[in-house]
Image (cartoon, rainbow, N blue to C red):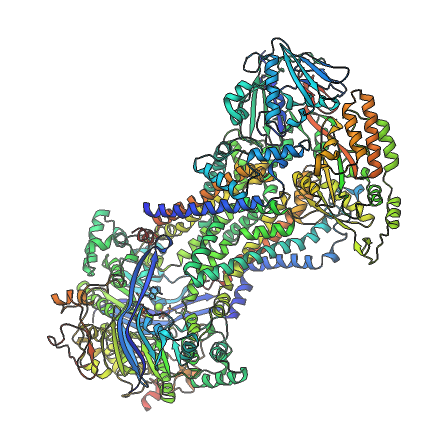
Amino acid sequence: AKQDPNKKKLVFAIANDIETLDVQQMYTGYTPHTLLFTPLISLGLSNDNAYPYLAESVEIAADGMSITLVFADDLKFSNGKNCSGQDVLKAIERYRQISPYASDWEEVKEVKAEGQKLTIYFKEPTAYFLPVLSSMYSGIVDVQEAEKLGKEGFGQKPVGIGPYVLKQWVQGSHLVFEKNPYYKDHLPFVKNHGPWAFDEVTVRIIPDNFTRISELEAGNVDVTQVPVEFLDRVKSNSELKVISSVGQGETYLALNTEKAPFSSRDFRLALNYAINKDEIKSAWMGSVEPIYGLVSPSQLAYSEETEKELRSKMKYDLQRARTILAELGCKDTDGDGYLEKDGKKLSFTLLGTSAQKVPLTVIQNQLKAVGIEVKIQEQAASYVRQAVQDRNYDMALRSWSWPDPDIWYYSFHSSMGKDSIWNSPELDKLLEEQRKIVDPKARAAKWGEISRKIAEDVPFIPLYYSYNYTAVRSNIEGYQVSVSGAIYWNDAVKK
Amino acid sequence: MAAKLLEVSGLEVQFDTSSGPVRAVRGVSFDIAEGEVLALVGESGCGKSTTALSILRLVPRPGEITGGRIVFDGVNLLDLDECSMTQYRGKQISMIFQNPLVALNPVYRSGFQVQEAVMLDKVPPDRAWRAALNVLKQVRLPDPEDRARSYPHELSGGMRQRVMIGMMISRFPRLLIADEPTTALDVTIQAQILDLLDDLRHEKRMSLLIITHDLGVVADIADRVGVMYAGALVETGDVTEVFEKPLHPYTQLLLKALPRGPKNELRLESIPGGVPNLSNLPPGCPFHPRCQRRLDICSKVEPETLEIHPGRTVRCHLVGGESFWKR
Amino acid sequence: MLNYVLKRLAVGVLVIISASIVLFSIMQLMPGDPIRMVADPRLPPHRIEELKRAWGLDKPAYVQYLYWMKNLLRGDMGTSIATGQPVGYLIASRLPYTLLLAGTAMVVRYLIGVPLGLIAALRQGTKLDRLLVMATTMLMMIPGYWFAILLMMVFAIKLRWLPISGFQGPASLVLPLMTMVLPGIGGTLRVTRSEVLDTAREPFVLTAHAKGLSARAVQVYHILRNALIPVTVSFFLNLPWLISGSVIIENVFAWPGMGRLVWGAIQSQDLPVVQGVFVMITALTVVCNIVGDIVAGLLDPRIRVEIEEARE
Amino acid sequence: MEALVELERVKKHFVIRDGILGRRRRFVHAVDDVSLSIVRGETFGIVGESGSGKTTIARIIPRLVNVTSGSVKFSGIDICRASGRELMLARRRMGIVFQDPASSLNPRVTVAASIQRPLQLAGLPAKEARDRVREVAELVNLGTEVLDKFPHELSGGQQQRASIARAIVLRPEFVILDEPTSALDVSVQAQVLNLLLDLQQRFSLTYLFISHNLPVVRYLCDRIAVMYLGKLVELASTGVLYREPLHPYSLALLMAAPPPDPKMRNRRRFILTGDPPSLTNPPQGCRLHPRCQFAVERCRVEEPELRDYGSGHLAACHRIGDLDLGFAM
Amino acid sequence: MSRKRTYLKAAKNGMFITGTVLFLTVLLVAVFADRIAPHKYDEMNIEKAFIPPGRAYLFGTDEFGRCLFSRIIYGSRIALKIGLMVVAIQISVGVSVGLLAGYFGGKLDMILSFITDLTWAMPPVVLSLAIVTVLGPSLERVVVSTALVSWPGCARMVRSKTQSIKNMPFVEAARALGESDLSIIVRYILPNTLGIVIVLTTLQLPGAILSTTGLSFLGLGSQPPSPDWGLILSEGVNYVSKAPWISIFPGLALIYTAVGFNLMGEGLRDILDPRT
Ligand SMILES: Nc1ncnc2c1ncn2[C@@H]1O[C@H](COP(=O)(O)OP(=O)(O)OP(=O)(O)O)[C@@H](O)[C@H]1O
Ligand SMILES: Nc1ncnc2c1ncn2[C@@H]1O[C@H](COP(=O)(O)OP(=O)(O)OP(=O)(O)O)[C@@H](O)[C@H]1O
Ligand SMILES: [Mg+2]
Ligand SMILES: [Mg+2]
């Protein structure tokens, strides 16, 4: 019997238009990039260790001063050209030159290639480096080809090493991929190491949620992200399966600590007690989980104890918030329902993006309950960032996602200049220390210390980390999912 | 006297406007003989154009012919259906309008507009074009070949009016209605057009119904004249008779209101007041508020049309009855 | 005539340049910069400065503009900061879809709107007339997103007659087309209706009747012919408007058009793309205006004279 | 005899700009080298075909348009060079009445307000102004009930009387009447003409009366100027002009309007052929020559000058003397 | 045309009456919003989220358990404010430009006409997107930017009307009386362009409301918890499958108001048209 041709096809749908296909030039990566470029290593299904992926083996020196990657002898680019350690080195050099994130490699002292072996030497032990190697940004490009095609040309016709190669790209509409016959990876937890079971993979760009979910339900899309508003609907559909994963990172409420009354720790503490994170969760249909520390469960260096401890200390307590505010001399003198301090009404702006409408509105409402007026201003994320940098704000919702908590380094360390929203010599020291701790347990403990320090000063208020939902058609089986939501399609088949 | 070509009797036209019905034409009766020129005069808004349009059954909405008969060559036009009426328009009766700029379609060449008319008689296009040129020559359009290829806005007022006349006589109608054919034109051009109309009428043996408010034009071209006031025909008669011995006070005053010499020779007789509003006519004779010789009856009963002798009628309480003979 | 067009084009170029300056200034006023718009927080400050320098964003605004202009004259519209792709390529790959949708929408809209307007005018004051006007008014006022979703639910999801989104052949065109066309019909209907009514009141129509043309002939050759002049012109005046005005529809139907491109570019302050699209649409507007004038001139000899006189 | 208004070699060329940025210019010689003077107390008539420059002259005198060259004097004041204040004062001594009564009054204000406005501008106190308005309204036979109406609620005759009232409310010496009756019905025209005569007698006004209706001009005017394509072709006192017109165009005008008398139907006619040519491109030589049956070669090349043929009878024609155009009218 | 006739025509014009009635209801609702609405527009009750329309909540509740009926009632104030503000700005810019260009002509006209053409040629959506993105989202900015790109139509119309009025005898007479240019523009020309301006206003109002809604939809307009219909609509579409009523009711309210204004404008046009 002839096989249904549809079974040999897989269709993804994504919401965002994609940028260049050159992973070394892009700012943000999406599904198409993962098809074309395979990361050097994998953090595994539970984000606990470094596993081989594109590299045949990965070895971290005990002192944390170097990482050695070995590649298969028959490693080939998607155009069939052999890829030696030297080629990988060239790709890394190109990355360090042109990628916006070249600074990820700043702590690297030297990279040496020897046959199919590549060794990365650090200036100091570098714990945070694994996520860099495990991200698709570290995908290997054919530098020779890139130089031939030029920056722009290569972005449209990339040559790298991934399970698929680009067949067709209709701007703004969809991309079609076909199998890369030369592909081979070394993931330890999958059976199939070649291209996947699908002859053709399509990635469609469908910005509107309603439309995307409708396409999914109609059977025209196999895999897509599900916005929480559509979760009920998708879950109730027996043809679909929902994979939920935990986002790596958190959303927090940044406070302008250089400006009264946010310069007062007690005031910030009062705000902390006034905000009910559980209510945000329920208003957002459970799609987020309250967080009190700095590390979310799917990140490296997470510690449950720290989280528990901080929760009991920092939990929502309306009464306490009111008491602190009263002690600070905030009083409703004119009976408008809002407090005044020194004759000035407590009225602040709250910046956030339009995607954060729910938490913004809930926080607005909660602060109203303690007598603080909040004016919401929805802005693009970069404006929020700029406003925070310029200290031109009262409160702002900010968030980020990265497998390693080291990302906080960029928000705190004094060397970040204006990007550092809060710093102190002790904090600087702690942040530098955690970078060098290679042992996961010890590193988690260090992060506990940092979290507690922050909870003490309350320079900002951690709010939540989010769940991500991905719908996959039920007739697709065999894929594996990591805690952070990465899906390994190697063994997947369509029934 | 030649046979009557057109007989209009008791014509009533009403406009249903938002401020109530307007009786634009009230019981108008007149006739035109073959080859005769009848002029209708009267002040603006007294229903002259409406009367003329009624004959072609082209009274625009919201106007409607509500009564009377229009007998053309023995056929009551008001009984015809729209389709047969089209057979009369242009072929039997045609009409030229006051302002030839707006009365010609700006997007077609003037020659085509004549040709289009000729082609209605099942004439093939090329012959129709030649016929059109011929007609334009007859109406004394200079350079007819050239002008026929011009668009209306490229022609002067006089030329346009000639194209218009050409278009309307191209199918040899038996009656030509000319609604203020010269009002929009300069006096020197007016003279040319009047001359042309007069010539055509003789050459083609057309009857002519000319509508104007210029008594000079009437005196110049008409055989007979009808004077209208507030939708009614108040006096008809032979031109010389009416001009010499007007019977209706309105006609009399009108003739005296015309300046005929320098100011120091005579003072103009002015008629007090203005033309009444047709939607709100005074009771009785519509002229009575302005009439210095009005009787009691004038403000109560509208006078009947009185035929003094064949072809001479008047509609006034002062004429006929006892009061007339007493004077 | 050619001379006239050339002169109009010259003014058009002036308009385009001024428009691009206006937009450039507006975009300069935006707080933040395109690099920050697209980058992760992982990007440290010194790296941002480096990238800005690489893109020439550290130069004074007028230098940036002149540079952009210089490249434009060489036919190079620059490179998108956010996506790293050539702007010319981005626009070229989106324009056909936009033109296909907007162009067809305009044509269909007029094909439906003009006859309906004619019917309404000929039946002026009747129930049918009122119904047509009312119904199209309602259509005109329905919020775009709403309408799009409604149509999608009915025709694509419930009835499964049409594809939901994307472009997979002519059938995909139907829904976006309907969303664009239906609200527009009202406008076309009204223009046609009032033009026909106005023309019907013109004295030359009376002339046409008086010379013995049948009612149908008068309607076709004298009323319609003249009334269609402004209607045709409005077609060309509306066309560019439609091209820029479809962000929402393109989003809903995942249509790979310019609206989405420019919307994304504005959000990420991708100046080269915004400028490129803007200039493109402005140019299209200018050209459409000129074409509209020429068509009007061809249809209406009175206008033609002005054009020809201007030429000497 | 004192000249109230004096025009000396007045030219007015309108520029019609077109092309891109108005680069191309064409000239309309609306008034071309016209000299005339209007004597205090007289009614001076101007006749001529449409577009011959009559209205332009009317607009030149109060400087509603600036002359291209030449000088305009109003009671000794050089209007063309007058300062703003002088001009304003001079303008207050003139009144203007236009042809179209319906658009002569601001449709958005009442008739009373329209008439009162000049007084207001002249700085009269409101109460006094209102009295004056009532006074003037009586003069022109406008009932007080009419004063509070809007222009469109009035009949044409009433509208025209209202605009006459506005023109004379400042007690001017000089009134410009630009075809004041041509939009009116015959019966109403007589009312207005009588009113004008009355006013002239009472206030010893000087009129400039523009019209193309010959009988009316003859009725009202003491002297008449005939214009053709921006040129003054003949100027004479009314009686003289009617008795012995010198210029063929004057004759054509006089003969063109048929008298309201059927007996005159078979009078001798003199009809100009052809249409008036374009003003942007007037014919060489005598401007009338393409339409004039008496034209000879000289008329085609040489432009005739305006010459005095005795007792202020001016005419510009090469063939005066060769022809006898005298008809008893 | 007398005033009485205008009233009569208005009384007989079905479109105008329907439009006026629709508009008046919106106006009344806006004025008495606090009395009509059973809840405050920002009163949250997260346990009561997503209650479908019914007895307890006429239009149901939204994701925060806010009463949708109350929000829409309060929203009418914003809708009217948007419409009137956009049109006010647009008309005042358009009218001034049109009057100046039309009256003075010459160089000034050339410059103003060029600016008008320029604004006309620029894609309005892109331009107002850019403006609002620059200034940051807020209702006022959306309003201003929408108005700033939509005045050329009005300017053109007023310009040509001014050109025709300025040659009317009554203006000429005014000049002869020594009226200043400013006085002529204000006293003589402006009042006479009022007719078309009024018609234009009512016809542009719904468009103004709709286009600001479009911008709100793209997240550029009012900020939460404002009961702006556009905002409710754009928030509601997220829940279009879970709670369709959140987006349906503001949509209906929008259509209701827009159709009201539109019919009123069309009606007014008929009424003020002297030919009918
Ligand atoms: N379309 C119309 N709608 C309403 N009333 C009309 C219409 N046409 C004419 N009338 C009325 O009919 C009356 C007669 O109009 P008509 O045009 O026949 O007068 P007229 O004598 O030809 O006037 P004029 O000398 O101004 O041409 C007018 O008073 C007018 O009120
Ligand atoms: N503002 C202007 N711009 C350009 N041309 C003008 C202007 N005003 C008048 N003209 C031209 O000047 C010429 C003389 O016009 P004017 O109004 O003085 O003539 P007229 O004798 O009063 O004519 P009518 O009898 O039609 O009123 C006309 O050809 C006219 O087109
Ligand atoms: Mg008439
Ligand atoms: Mg004039």
The image quarter in which residue A119 lies? top right
- Image position of A176 with respect to C123: above or below: above
Can the viewer see residue D63? Answer: yes
Please, which residue is most extreme toward the top here? Answer: A73
Residue A234 in percent (x, y) is at 70, 30
Residue B294 in percent (x, y) is at 39, 86
The image quarter in which residue A310 lies? top right
- Image position of C155 with respect to C235: above or below: above
Describe residue A144's horizontal placement relative to residue D167 as left or right. Answer: right
- Image position of A411 with respect to B261: above or below: above
Q: Who's the residue at 41% across and 60% down the image?
A: E106
How many numbered marks appear? 0
Q: Quadrant of the N terminus of chain B?
A: bottom left
Q: Who's the residue at 20% across and 57% down the image?
A: B135
Describe residue D291's horizontal placement relative to residue E146 as left or right. Answer: left
- Image position of A165 with respect to C230: above or below: above
Describe residue C3's horizontal placement relative to residue A273 as left or right. Answer: left
The image quarter in which residue B305 lies? bottom left
| Front one among D180 and D256 | D180
Q: Quadrant of the C terminus of chain B?
A: bottom left
Residue E18 in percent (x, y) is at 59, 57
| Front one among B282 and D318 | D318
Please, which residue is most extreme toward the left here? Answer: D322
| Front one among D133 and A108 | A108
| Front one among B210 and D168 | D168
Residue E10 in percent (x, y) is at 54, 64
Ligand 4 placement by image quarter:
bottom left
Can the viewer see residue A284? Answer: no
